[in-house]
Image (tube, rainbow, N blue to C red):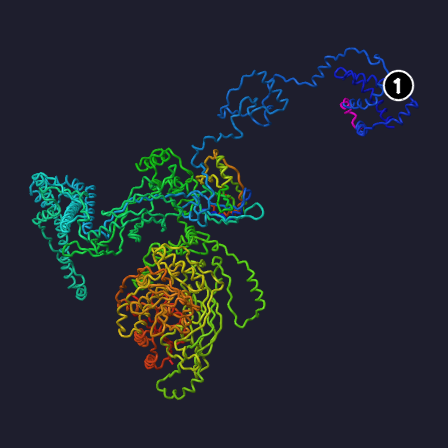
């Protein structure tokens, strides 16, 4: 019966090799969690910064969860995409972070990565775009072993999340 | 001086230094050269010491010699001196280095000496004794320099960092390995040495590291070669090309990934006609035979009869045996014993037997029918002397042993008889028992009665008399009849002979083969040959429509004589959009033209149905096209008789079966190209759902076996897949009920222990439910503002309405609709509405950039120029014009932001008060005074009151019949539930009522100075909000809806002036209405809808419309419209002569003019309901006339089409005007040509205007539509007055169908004729009473503080007037009416009026009554009169009259 409000925004991303980025995001919570209101996934606009490196989206997130347990605390997963001058989209990075569990305002930097793929794939990515993507994007937030996945680091997505907890103390969860 | 300094230096130091070097360093490292130099220097020193004071030469040298000073040296020396004084103790160490430097310094000087002075070898040599350093000294020195590690064991604590205990990895269970063998002493020495060297060589256990560490501090990773194949499925990556995002991809559930490479394989294998228009009679019979035979085969396959017989047989045998043994004796026994245990078990047996009998009967009739049809075929073949079908029926006889068969037969009959008798017996016994019981009761009652009677006699006679007849006891029961056992056997035998094979009769097995010969064409008679030729000319193909778009078509195959077409083609459809419908259209091709025969909708396959596993299914289709031939072909939808005498006609429709199979394709690597199984809405990453049970049923569901089972069956788990083994095992355990230790573990298995609350508690939370419902946008809770923070503050009441709606579903509240038919229509309309909304859902999601981003136009040079000119404009122009305002999107609005601005400018020709003759007796007197009196009397003091959403504002009072107010009224607008979205605003049903009142100041003459202000309603206009919203402004002069009779008022006539001629029609008011801020009206749906129209026609119409809008953007031009099924239909298909109700025509058989007016009135009585309100989307759907009459609600277009069609059937030549009018905006009117003048009919009001009528609401004429063509207005003007309606002139009207593109003869979508429901007078009367009751209650409700008295006498008088008004169609009856009333109610001042409305619901009537404000009369002695009259028209069209009057006693 405890409630959790996640109110904030996806501020933007920086450190990617190219600009003109957009982001698909989603919040994944365990079985004990119920979404009362708000959208738990979405996509930002494509931002092409004229100056500077950082692409700003300022995409609002406003979620209200009710939960009967702590397991499966909501996690945020992100996919940063790049839209090139032909209007084609390619994946630039997967990212994941937990929604902070302490109340208050949090500024989160979520580092992203993307699969490297074989040299042939890297070569074709260099020249014709596209790139290897996870066949199963659930991997971003599931705890499977990834040691055999070959990835490279991409940029960082900035998030600002305000957390409001309600009635957690009633169940002995001190915040 | 320098030299001296140097020398002194040397003196003070040098000797000692040399001594020391001699002593220490000489044995170590001095070279002979150094020695030699040293010797030389010593000699020079000697000489220098000797020759002090220096010689002249020396002095000269000293002063003239060019020293090459070394500044470094000098500085060094000075600094060194300072240092030396400071650090005497360091001297010892510095000595060595310094001496070297000194040597160098002196070398320069000594060189000259060496060459100058000639010296002997003796001078260079010196004998020295062997140097020996003593052992002690040496040992001491060595100790200083060298370190010898000891061989003693080092303490562990020394080897480890401080305060850390040794850690033994072996003890921790790690494999460490064997250390290489080293002797203990060596190890100790090594350890000591390492300790001294302070190097990090010790492990955690305090010993020297000798082995690799089993714990890796940095992970190493195996190389990635050759590993791609066996990667975990979750880790696999796919190379995806950079592609443009396909927006439609969003609608394949759950994947925003461009992953959706889905493929549907459509396998169209063939087509079989079960009837075709080209069938000959023999074909008809043949196909019937085939059908029957198929039925027979399938029955044979199921073998239900055999199955049931087997079931029955054992019991039957028992019965048989019993009856055989005991004969009929046992029946008698059973009769006596009364409880026969064995036949109780017959209950189910009896049912089975009945089932078997039924099946047997069916079998037999089927066989009979087969034989009958075969005989008919044979007869037909004989008759026509040729054969068309290859069918042959063989009847195979299977002989049976007659005797045994008979015995079996007898036995069965006997068993049945016995059983039936027993059954009857049982029934009898039961009845008898009941009878006995009743008899007992009756007797008891009799006894009691007798006693009671006796008592009553004594006590009170009155009571018994009054009670006597009431308390009538049970009558004496009748004993049941004995069953008639004799007739039973006869009945059984009759039945058996009907449904069963006779004993000894051979079993007939029909066999159908298609091996017969077909007579060749040259033998056949002419009509048959013609038929065959026709068949040969035809070919068929199938179009495959995916989501209503044609994607492909099969090759066209010619029709064979057996009416089977084989295609055998498989189409792979790569799909992006979510599959909604897959439709196969069967087309028939004759020569070059093709026509649609039928459509077959194929269900979208389950994601698990893959190519290969899908089975070919047969889908039936039929078409209702009427086809007739003059040859042997029987046609379709034509009555056909197969009998010789032409009796027993039947109508056959073209029908058949398409054999096809739709399945999901399989990719190259056996990956099914099907969407995920669980189509949960949304779900960015729900790809896992298809194989992850947790994401499917949720973690908590894992405890629930049932849910898992459900999931397993739904997802069609492969039981042989080792991945699913655990689930399969679990399911097995669950289903068998055994509890064993499961060998699996659960995700979140600790969930239960740590739960705060249970699921039920979470579900039962009202607050959460409220929040969720609000989020889902459930209508009741949409924009629900305040959700309380605490559970206890949420009341149950909130949900009541919602739950009620859920429960009731589509039960329509009849109270609200008052009329069962309208209630039904409302439900039907609701359904259509839902389907329309669903259809538009997709179309609505296609956003353009302009929908999301509002871009200000960059001003061009031209605009700049205009702006410069604007500077010169007068600040306050004489004729101000309204500027375009900025539009506001509705999303950021809240209550109170939106205002409705109503600008009331002026009115014309308002009715004036009639000089009142209060008392009939004084009429002559007042007549004399009248001329004088009128001058002094105010004619009328009108003001306008605008009411909207129960807010009422009014203007000031003006004077006279042609007042000018020029006032602006601001009315607040609030959307339902505070939802200001476009779709919500569109469906606002509220109306703006603009009422004109007369303010009457009533001075009680003579008595006091009390003045009472009364107001009398004079007329009203109502404008729906939706019109204002879609038009964004309404500007013009409108005709005020004045009541037919206005008591106490009269039209002012002949008032002189120039415009008398035009004022004869009624009262008008000039208005301007708009919404502030200007809202953006909803965009029309851009989606192009599919159509059955010819492609060429559609293109032409598109071109026509485009050209029209390019050259004349403000003239509406419609060539195609959307029907209720969402299909595009050419507009002329709507125009077709349709019969008006005969009752209306009969009323004026000789006066066509009157009849037309009456028909128009009938049409206008159908309530109008804008499409955008009805369907809550901006769409314009045209329903056909029969649909319109069924719904009894429609837009202006429907009214116009109906009226136009009526006029057509009445022999006129009307055409539909598509144009714009005030206030409704784009609309449709009807144009007729009568007596050399054009009349424009407003179909929704029933009014007609001549072409030159100034107040005709039609403003622009865009195009004219007749039944065969569309004409677009290309004249200079659009106003009806200046338009020439001569469509023949090509320079005035541009026709759609011209010589270059002629009308292909489009058939109409309208029905051939309309069927009207009879007038139901009873229902109308009932409705009338109900409306009257409701209105009376409402008026009393609106006057909560005053008593409301009803004047019954006046009411009954008024009631009599209403039918007359209806008869006259609202024409002026005022004179006679007034006199009548006046004479009846002489001493009352009466003001009142009749209201006339079409009937749709009760609500508009109440609103209309409320807006007149009759209830607002405050006078204490007021009485009211209210009469309602409902006049029924055919087809349940109702005209409602409400007569309202207030009476004040004088």
Q: Which of B157 and B596 is in front in this view?
A: B596
Residue B643 horizontal/vertical position (percent)? 15, 54
Position above or below: B752 against B1009:
above
* B404 relative position to B1067: left or right: left
Residue A1 horizontal/vertical position (percent)? 44, 47
* B728 relative position to B178: left or right: left
Number of other residues with Cα within 10 Å of mark 1, as a class: few under 14, some 14 to 19, many 20 or more: few
Residue A97 in sight: no
- Image quarter in which the C terminus of chain B is found: bottom left
Q: Which of B941 and B1194 is in front in this view?
A: B1194
**In the image, is residue B684 part of the stretch drawn in magenta?**
no
Magenta residues, dominant SS class: helix
| Residue B65 figure quarter | top right
Position above or below: B710 against B1179:
above
**Host chain of mark 1:** B
Residue B869 horizontal/vertical position (percent)? 57, 66
* B111 relative position to B830: left or right: right
Looking at the rendered structure, the secondary structure element under dot 1 is: helix
| Residue B1312 figure quarter | bottom left
Magenta residues span B85-96
Residue position for label 1: B47
**In the image, is residue B90 part of the stretch drawn in magenta?**
yes
| Residue B1227 figure quarter | bottom left
Q: Which residue lies furthest to the front in this view?
A: B522
Residue B209 horizontal/vertical position (percent)? 56, 22
Residue B502 in sight: yes
- Image quarter in which the N terminus of chain B is found: top right
């Amino acid at each position: 019966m405890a409630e959790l409000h996640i109110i904030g925004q996806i501020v933007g991303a920086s450190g990617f090799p190219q600009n003109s980025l957009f982001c698909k995001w989603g919040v994944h919570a365990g079985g004990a969690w119920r979404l009362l209101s708000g959208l738990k996934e979405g996509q930002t606009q494509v931002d092409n910064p004229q100056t500077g490196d950082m692409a700003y989206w300022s995409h609002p997130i406003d979620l209200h969860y009710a939960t009967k347990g702590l397991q499966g605390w909501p996690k945020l997963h992100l996919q940063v995409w790049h839209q090139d001058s032909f209007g084609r989209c390619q994946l630039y990075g997967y990212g994941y972070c937990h929604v902070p569990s302490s109340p208050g305002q949090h500024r989160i930097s979520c580092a992203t990565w993307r699969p490297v793929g074989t040299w042939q794939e890297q070569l074709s990515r260099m020249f014709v775009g596209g790139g290897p993507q996870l066949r199963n994007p659930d991997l971003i937030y599931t705890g499977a072993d990834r040691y055999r996945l070959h990835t490279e680091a991409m940029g960082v997505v900035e998030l600002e999340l305000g957390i409001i907890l309600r009635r957690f103390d009633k169940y002995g969860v001190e915040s | 001086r320098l030299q001296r300094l140097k020398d002194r230096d040397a003196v003070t130091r040098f000797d000692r230094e040399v001594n020391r070097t001699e002593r220490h360093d000489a044995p170590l490292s001095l070279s002979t050269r150094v020695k030699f130099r040293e010797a030389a220097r010593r000699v020079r020193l000697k000489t220098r010491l000797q020759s002090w004071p220096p010689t002249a030469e020396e002095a000269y040298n000293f002063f003239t010699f060019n020293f090459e000073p070394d500044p470094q040296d000098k500085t060094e020396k000075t600094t060194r001196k300072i240092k030396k004084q400071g650090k005497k103790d360091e001297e010892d160490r510095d000595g060595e280095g310094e001496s070297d430097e000194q040597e160098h310094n002196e070398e320069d000087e000594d060189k000259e000496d060496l060459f100058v002075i000639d010296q002997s070898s003796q001078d260079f040599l010196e004998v020295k004794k062997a140097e020996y350093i003593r052992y002690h000294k040496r040992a001491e020195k060595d100790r200083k320099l060298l370190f010898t590690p000891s061989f003693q064991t080092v303490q562990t604590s020394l080897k480890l960092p401080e305060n850390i205990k040794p850690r033994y990895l072996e003890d921790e269970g790690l494999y460490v390995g064997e250390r290489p063998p080293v002797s203990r002493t060596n190890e100790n020495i090594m350890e000591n040495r390492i300790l001294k060297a302070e190097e990090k060589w010790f492990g955690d256990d305090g010993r020297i590291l000798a082995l690799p560490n089993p714990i890796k501090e940095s992970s190493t990773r195996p190389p990635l070669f050759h590993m791609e194949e066996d990667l975990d499925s979750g880790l696999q990556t796919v190379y995806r090309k950079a592609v443009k995002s396909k927006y439609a991809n969003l609608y394949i559930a759950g994947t925003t990934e461009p992953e959706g490479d889905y493929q549907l394989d459509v396998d169209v294998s063939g087509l079989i006609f079960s009837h075709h228009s080209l069938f000959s009679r023999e074909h008809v019979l043949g196909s019937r035979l085939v059908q029957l035979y198929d039925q027979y085969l399938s029955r044979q396959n199921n073998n239900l009869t055999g199955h049931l017989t087997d079931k029955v047989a054992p019991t039957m045998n028992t019965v048989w045996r019993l009856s055989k043994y005991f004969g009929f004796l046992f029946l008698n026994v059973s009769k006596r014993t009364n409880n026969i245990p064995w036949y109780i078990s017959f209950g189910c047996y009896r049912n089975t037997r009945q089932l078997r009998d039924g099946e047997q009967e069916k079998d037999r009739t089927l066989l009979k029918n087969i034989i009958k049809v075969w005989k008919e075929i044979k007869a037909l073949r004989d008759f026509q002397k040729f054969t068309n079908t290859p069918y042959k029926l063989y009847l195979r006889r299977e002989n049976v042993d007659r005797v045994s068969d008979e015995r079996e037969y007898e036995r069965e009959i006997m068993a049945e008889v016995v059983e039936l008798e027993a059954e009857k017996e049982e029934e009898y016994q039961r009845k008898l028992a009941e009878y006995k019981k009743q008899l007992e009761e009756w007797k008891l009652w009799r006894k009691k009665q007798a006693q009671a009677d006796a008592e009553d006699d004594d006590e009170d006679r009155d009571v018994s008399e009054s009670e006597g007849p009431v308390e009538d006891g049970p009558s004496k029961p009748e004993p049941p009849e004995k069953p008639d056992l004799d007739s039973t056997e006869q009945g059984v035998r009759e039945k058996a002979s009907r449904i069963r094979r006779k004993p000894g009769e051979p079993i007939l097995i029909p066999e159908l083969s298609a091996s017969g010969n077909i007579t060749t064409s040259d033998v056949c008679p002419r009509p048959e040959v013609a038929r065959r030729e026709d068949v040969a000319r035809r070919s068929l193909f199938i179009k495959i429509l995916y989501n209503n778009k044609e994607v492909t078509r099969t090759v066209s195959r010619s029709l064979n004589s057996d009416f089977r077409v084989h295609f055998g083609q498989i189409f792979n459809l790569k799909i992006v959009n979510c599959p909604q419908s897959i439709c196969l259209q069967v087309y028939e091709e004759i020569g070059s033209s093709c026509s649609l025969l039928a459509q077959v909708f194929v269900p979208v396959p389950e994601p698990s149905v893959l190519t290969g596993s899908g089975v070919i299914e047969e889908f039936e289709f039929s078409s209702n096209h009427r086809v007739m031939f003059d040859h042997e072909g029987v046609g379709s939808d034509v009555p056909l008789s197969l009998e010789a005498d032409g009796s027993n006609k039947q109508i056959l429709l073209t029908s058949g079966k398409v054999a096809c199979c739709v399945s999901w394709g399989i990719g190259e690597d056996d990956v099914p190209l099907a969407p995920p199984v669980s189509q949960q809405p949304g779900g960015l990453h729900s790809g896992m759902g298809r194989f992850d049970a947790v994401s499917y049923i949720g973690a908590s569901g894992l405890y629930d076996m049932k849910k898992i089972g459900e999931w397993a069956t739904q997802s069609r788990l492969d039981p042989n897949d080792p991945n699913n083994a655990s689930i399969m095992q679990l399911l097995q355990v669950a289903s068998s009920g055994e509890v064993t230790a499961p060998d699996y573990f659960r995700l979140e298995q600790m969930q239960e222990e740590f739960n705060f609350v249970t699921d039920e508690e979470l579900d039962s939370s009202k607050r959460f439910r409220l929040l969720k419902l609000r989020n889902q946008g459930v209508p009741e809770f949409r924009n629900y503002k305040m959700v309380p923070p605490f559970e206890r503050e949420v009341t149950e009441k909130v949900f009541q309405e919602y739950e009620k709606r859920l429960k009731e579903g589509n039960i329509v509240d009849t109270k609200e609709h008052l009329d069962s038919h309208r209630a039904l229509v409302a439900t039907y309309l609701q359904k259509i509405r839902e389907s329309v909304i669903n259809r538009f859902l997709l179309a609505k999601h296609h956003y353009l950039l302009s929908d999301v981003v509002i871009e200000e136009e960059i001003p061009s040079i031209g605009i700049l120029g205009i702006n410069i000119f604007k500077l010169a404009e007068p600040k306050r122009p004489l004729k101000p014009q309204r500027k375009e305002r900025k539009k506001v999107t509705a999303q950021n609005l809240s209550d109170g932001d939106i205002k409705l601005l109503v600008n009331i400018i002026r009115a014309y020709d308002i009715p004036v008060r009639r000089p009142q003759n209060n008392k009939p007796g004084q009429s002559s007197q007042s007549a004399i005074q009248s001329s004088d009196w009128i001058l002094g009397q105010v004619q009328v003091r009108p003001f306008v009151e605008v009411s909207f959403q129960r807010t009422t504002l009014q203007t000031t009072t003006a004077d006279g019949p042609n007042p000018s107010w020029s006032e602006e009224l601001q009315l607040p607008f609030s959307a339902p539930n505070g939802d200001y979205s476009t779709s919500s605003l569109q469906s606002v049903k509220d109306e703006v009522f603009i009422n004109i009142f007369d303010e009457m100041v009533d001075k009680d003459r003579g008595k006091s100075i009390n003045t009472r202000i009364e107001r009398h309603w004079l007329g009203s206009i109502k404008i729906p909000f939706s019109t204002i919203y879609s038009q964004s402004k309404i500007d013009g002069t409108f005709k005020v809806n004045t009541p037919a009779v206005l008591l106490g008022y009269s039209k002012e006539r002949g008032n002189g002036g120039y415009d008398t001629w035009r004022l004869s029609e009624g009262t008008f008011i000039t208005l301007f209405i708009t919404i502030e801020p200007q809202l953006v009206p909803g965009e029309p749906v851009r989606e192009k809808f599919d159509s059955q129209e010819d492609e060429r026609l559609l293109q032409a119409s598109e071109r026509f419309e485009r050209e029209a809008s390019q050259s004349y953007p403000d003239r509406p031009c419609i060539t195609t419209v959307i029907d209720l099924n969402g299909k595009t239909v050419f507009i002329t298909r709507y125009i077709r002569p349709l019969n008006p109700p005969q009752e209306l025509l009969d009323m004026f058989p000789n006066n066509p003019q009157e009849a037309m007016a009456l028909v128009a009135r009938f049409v206008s009585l159908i309530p109008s309901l804008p499409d955008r309100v009805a369907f809550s989307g901006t769409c314009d759907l045209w329903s056909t006339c029969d649909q319109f009459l069924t719904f009894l609600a429609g837009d202006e277009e429907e009214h116009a089409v109906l009226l136009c069609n009526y006029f057509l059937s009445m022999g006129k030549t009307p055409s539909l005007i598509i144009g714009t009018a005030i206030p409704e905006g784009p609309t449709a009117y009807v144009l007729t040509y009568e007596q050399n003048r054009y009349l424009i009919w407003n179909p929704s009001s029933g009014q007609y205007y001549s072409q030159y009528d100034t107040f005709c609401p039609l403003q622009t004429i865009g195009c004219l539509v007749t039944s065969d063509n569309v004409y677009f207005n290309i004249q200079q003007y659009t106003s009806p007055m200046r338009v020439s309606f001569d469509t023949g002139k090509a320079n005035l009207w541009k026709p759609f169908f011209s010589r270059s593109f002629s009308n292909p003869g489009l058939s109409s979508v309208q029905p051939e004729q309309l069927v009207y429901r009879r007038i139901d007078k009873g229902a109308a009367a009932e409705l009338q009473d109900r409306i009257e009751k409701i209105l009376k209650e409402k008026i009393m409700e609106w006057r909560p503080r005053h008593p409301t008295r009803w004047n019954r006498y006046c009411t009954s008088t008024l009631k009599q007037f209403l039918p007359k008004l209806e008869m006259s169609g609202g024409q002026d009856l005022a004179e006679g009416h007034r006199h009548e009333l006046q004479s009846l109610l002489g001493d009352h001042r009466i003001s009142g009026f009749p209201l006339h409305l079409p009937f749709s619901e009760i609500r508009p009537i109440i609103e209309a009554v409320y807006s007149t404000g009759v209830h607002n009369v405050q006078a204490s002695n007021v009485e009211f009169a209210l009469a309602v009259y409902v006049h029924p028209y055919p087809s349940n069209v109702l005209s409602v009259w409400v007569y309202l009057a207030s009476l004040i006693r004088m």
